[in-house]
Image: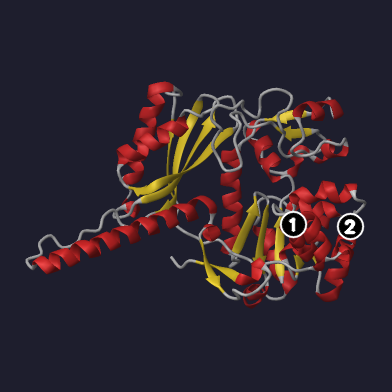
């Protein structure tokens, strides 16, 4: 049984609480107000960074707003809507500065308290997380007690749903309107899921683009998607259509809980050094402090998160994956100084956090080989080891950028099949 924890309007609640200095985190921040998260300055892309040589996405009325409150949704405002259209539909709409740093910190705290009750958590997006509930019955008792334990440790009021699959559990959590969790089991879960709107498909990245074309075709519920059949959905929409039909049938992939690892971070109040060369010096101090930590001794750094609290309000966050695992402070500082130039406003505080560790800084072979044949064989072996190390380095960089399934190996299964998907199967490459 998969449990889904849904924190409504999570990003907006955190951003609104940060905008009101000293405000407590809670839904009372949004009560009866038409709010929306303002477009992120600098045109941040989903993968991080800013497109060079292009006009920032936040310039002008074509900027896309972030998460919106319930009062704004009631007037037709939706997340991702153009700023000009949102203001036309809701003239009293108030924009809250985006705070990706605060959202990341608050979400990490929520995930930490969920893991403290013994749950193996798979975070989907800020405000949505899944975990397998059955293994926790030995700790907390029946399913209802397990879900109650999860709700009691969270800082923000949560909606919780439980169902046989991840997608069905998400639909149940979105349908909850009280503190009582919604539990769906067996055939009842499949029938209930069929009556839900196709809008649920927009909650999954693979099928988010199918909602609008399906509604234009007159398909409004998942039961109607199911009746279309897998072949028709796949023929019309490709792989996304096949995935959507599987979700409507109640099929889904297994959970992939995150690995709980070490978290090393250093922060420093910027003070008067909120731009220019002085800010670069503050960055250098942070890098030196981080590399001086005893926990990092003997290891290199693969990925870091550079974040800042901005003086006008809100925050800024940039994830940096190095092309090569580093332990040299000068090279790390040079790589981060390029991202530091993307700050949309003067900073009040700068923070550096290690997100991924690399291998040991160096590997040294034999210095002297007396036998000439052994020397030649040693050189050939060294070239082979060098190629293997470069390949492993490339795989580690790809995994750090795009996840554990970024690098897969193709295994030949049925070379004579007329269906391309049956000829080979993709399997993860062991680390």
341 in relation to 156, above or below: above
Number of residue marks: 2
Name the residue beneath numbered marker 2. Answer: 221
Residue sitting at 83 percent across and 62 percent down? Answer: 232
Task: Point out residue 324 in the picture as x, y percentages from the top left corner.
Answer: 37, 48
The front one of 118 and 223 is 223
Residue 186 left/right relative to 263: right
Query: Marks 1 and 2, how far apart in space?
Result: 20 Å
197 or 409, nearer to the observer: 409
Question: Which residue is the site of mark 1?
Answer: 238
Residue most toward the right? Answer: 218
Q: Can residue 177 be seen in this view?
A: no
Q: Nearer the viewer, mark 1 or mark 2?
A: 1
* Residue 86 x %, y %: 80, 30
Q: Which residue is drawn at 78% across and 26% down?
A: 84
Tell me which label, 1 or 2, sits earlier in the chain: 2
Q: Where is residue 146 drawn, in percent x and y?
A: 69, 69
Residue 270's tag is: none
């Amino acid at each position: 049984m998969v449990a889904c924890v849904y924190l409504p309007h999570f990003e907006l609640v955190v951003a609104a609480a940060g905008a009101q200095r000293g405000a407590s985190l809670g839904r009372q921040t949004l009560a009866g107000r038409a709010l929306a998260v303002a477009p992120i300055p600098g045109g941040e892309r989903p993968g991080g960074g800013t497109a060079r040589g292009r006009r920032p996405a936040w310039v002008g009325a074509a900027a896309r707003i972030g998460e919106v409150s319930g009062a704004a949704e009631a007037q037709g405002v939706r997340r991702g809507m153009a700023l000009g259209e949102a203001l036309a539909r809701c003239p009293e709409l108030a924009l809250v500065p985006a705070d990706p740093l605060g959202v990341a910190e608050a979400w990490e705290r929520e995930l930490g308290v969920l893991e403290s009750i013994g749950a193996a958590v798979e975070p989907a997006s800020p405000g949505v997380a899944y975990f397998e509930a059955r293994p926790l019955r030995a700790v907390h008792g029946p399913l209802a007690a397990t879900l109650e334990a999860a709700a009691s440790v969270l800082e923000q009021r949560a909606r919780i749903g439980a169902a046989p699959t991840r997608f069905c559990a998400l639909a149940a959590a979105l349908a909850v309107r009280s503190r009582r969790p919604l539990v769906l089991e067996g055939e009842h879960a499949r029938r209930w899921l069929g009556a839900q709107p196709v809008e649920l498909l927009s909650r999954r990245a693979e099928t988010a683009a199918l909602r609008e074309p399906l509604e234009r075709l007159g398909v409004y519920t998942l039961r109607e998607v199911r009746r279309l059949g897998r072949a028709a959905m796949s023929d019309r929409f490709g792989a996304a259509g096949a995935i959507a039909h599987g979700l409507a049938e109640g099929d889904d992939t297994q959970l992939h809980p995150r690995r709980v690892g070490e978290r090393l971070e250093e922060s420093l109040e910027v003070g008067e050094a909120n731009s220019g060369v002085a800010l670069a010096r503050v960055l250098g101090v942070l890098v030196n402090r981080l590399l001086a930590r005893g926990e990092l001794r003997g290891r290199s750094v693969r990925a870091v998160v550079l974040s800042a609290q901005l003086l006008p309000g809100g925050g800024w966050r940039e994830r940096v994956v190095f092309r090569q695992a580093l332990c040299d402070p000068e090279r790390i500082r040079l790589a981060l100084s390029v991202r530091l130039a993307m700050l949309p406003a003067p900073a009040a505080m700068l923070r550096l956090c290690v997100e991924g560790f690399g291998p040991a800084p160096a590997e040294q072979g034999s210095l002297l080989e007396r036998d000439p044949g052994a020397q030649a064989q040693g050189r050939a072996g060294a070239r082979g080891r060098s190629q293997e190390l470069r390949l492993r380095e490339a795989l580690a960089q790809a995994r750090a950028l795009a996840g554990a399934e970024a690098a897969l190996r193709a295994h030949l299964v049925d070379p004579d099949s007329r269906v391309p998907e049956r000829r080979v199967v993709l399997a993860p490459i062991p680390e």
